[in-house]
Amino acid sequence: MNFKKSYHLLLIASIAYLPLQAQETGKWQNLFDGKTLNGWKQIVGKAPYAITDGAIVGTMTKGSANSFLVTEKEYGDFILEADIKLEGTETNSGIQTRSHFDPTRDNGKGRVYGRQMEIDPSPRAWTGGIYDEARRMWLYPLELDTAAKKAYKPEEYNHYRIEAIGNETKTWVNGVPAAYVIDTLDQTGFIGLQVHAISKDELDGKKVYFKNIRIQTKNLKPTSFPKGIYVVDLAPNHLSAYDKENGYKLLFDGKSSAGWKSARTKTAPFPVKGWEIKDGTITVLPSDGKEAANGGDIVTNDEYSAFDLSFEFKLTPGANSGVKYFVTLDENTNGSAIGLEYQVLDDERHPDAKLGRDGDRTLASLYDLITSKKEKRFLHPIGEWNRGRVVVYPDNRVEHYLNGIKVLEYVRGSAEFKHLVSISKYKVWKDFGLAKAGHILLQDHGNRVSFRSIKLKNL
């Protein structure tokens, strides 16, 4: 290889490494001196923490709750790095950020709560994801960034980086971007090292090793993520600069009906009754559970073919609604307009959950066609906000997500899809679900349901 070509390759490699290194404008401070636990304290759990060969070693202990060794000092904005090794593939750990302690929880034993960067060596592979310990549960499971699942190296020290700057938290695993969350809660709090509780006897005594723990708190500059990584933005009706650069737009501005119209006809304006826009939400008002009997469904002015759609929804007890896509309004129905539907439903109280076939009318299902595969532990209670997502790829693959977890997938127009339509209520509609483009619809099913943070990116 000649010198000129070699120099160019070296230059390219250097530039590729710049995004992380270019941010090191502040001064690093060691949070662990390698010899003592000065500056740290254990506040919950019985798992012991000791120092061995320059590392903090936590030992998983049968009968103990989640244990936490936390900083005595609280931190606001910071960049944190650490090297961590976890024994086994059925264990778990994490780093708490801007977290807190409630001494009244768990019958006076106390509980740590706040955002945590997950360390997960299991086949699920969610290392680098963001979990809200003892509060809102998963904020960013790595179903949202599957490329990062491959970054973790089992039974080895892995290098982690966390940036908490303003409302943004980003994580990296061995230099690979993993999670991106925007959250308005917790501007300050402690940093904590978790030893997770265990449920199996054979995990008793497994260890987690923490070393090279360092932090920057001044002259911070956020590191840019590469394009195309999904952002969980918990600030209502907000679009980050990153999302704007990646082509997302808000379908609901939080203040008005701009961009929406009635679904009753192709030219009908936004309903004069039956919908309320208030406090950053757009809400269908109740009418005794009668479908489209009040304001009726509403649809976007624009039509979409391949897209990534996200929305938050809040159900009242026993409520029913839905988010439909590929709605053409060609059918001229008296009730709800026709389209593929992401079901929005109180599964426990609404009778529709027990109808259909094998649960295909339950929350997050493709209504009357495909049942969503979801675990109750990933659901937020009725009356709290849940996050829905529908991704339609240009090749007609479709995915439904609920609170960051993929719950179903299918291919529009496939033989399997056509068969499912043929045994559903939609068999009477020619070429159901196969339109090249269509509106996004929010359904009026006669129950009070609220929506917000509706964003879409054309694919």
Image (cartoon, helix red, strand yellow):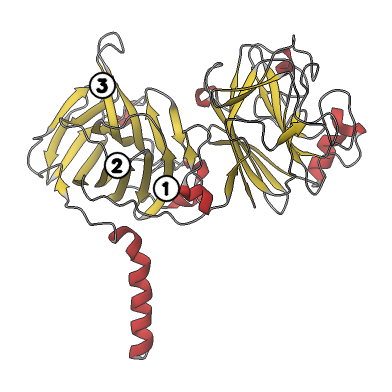
Q: Which mark is residue 178?
A: 1
How far across and down, in percent of the image, does residue 298 sit? 74, 29
Label 1 to label 2: alpha-carbon separation: 18 Å
How far across and down, in percent of the image, does residue 257 sit? 67, 31
Q: Is residue 431 above or below residue 312?
A: below
Q: Is residue 347 above or below residue 207?
A: above
**Quick one: SS at disc 3?**
strand
Q: Residue at x 24, y 14 (%)?
A: 103
Q: Residue at x 15, y 30 (%)?
A: 72
Whether residue 370 is visible here, answered yes or no, is no
**Amino acid under label 3?**
Phe
Q: In the rendered picture of this protein, how many numbered marks are placed on residues?
A: 3
**Quick one: SS at disc 1?**
strand
Label 1 to label 3: alpha-carbon separation: 27 Å
**Quick one: SS at disc 2?**
strand
Label 3 to label 2: alpha-carbon separation: 25 Å
Other residues around mark 1 within 10 Å, as few (<14) / some (14–19) / many (≥20):
many
Other residues around mark 2 within 10 Å, as few (<14) / some (14–19) / many (≥20):
many
Q: Which mark is residue 86?
A: 2
How far across and down, in percent of the image, does residue 18 sit? 33, 64
* Labels 3 and 2: the sequence-earlier one: 2
Q: Which mark is residue 388?
A: none
Whether residue 31 is visible here, answered yes or no, is yes
Q: Is residue 211 above or below residue 403?
A: below
How far across and down, in percent of the image, does residue 360 sit? 73, 26
**Amino acid under label 1?**
Ala
Q: Which mark is residue 101?
A: 3
* Labels 1 and 2: the sequence-earlier one: 2
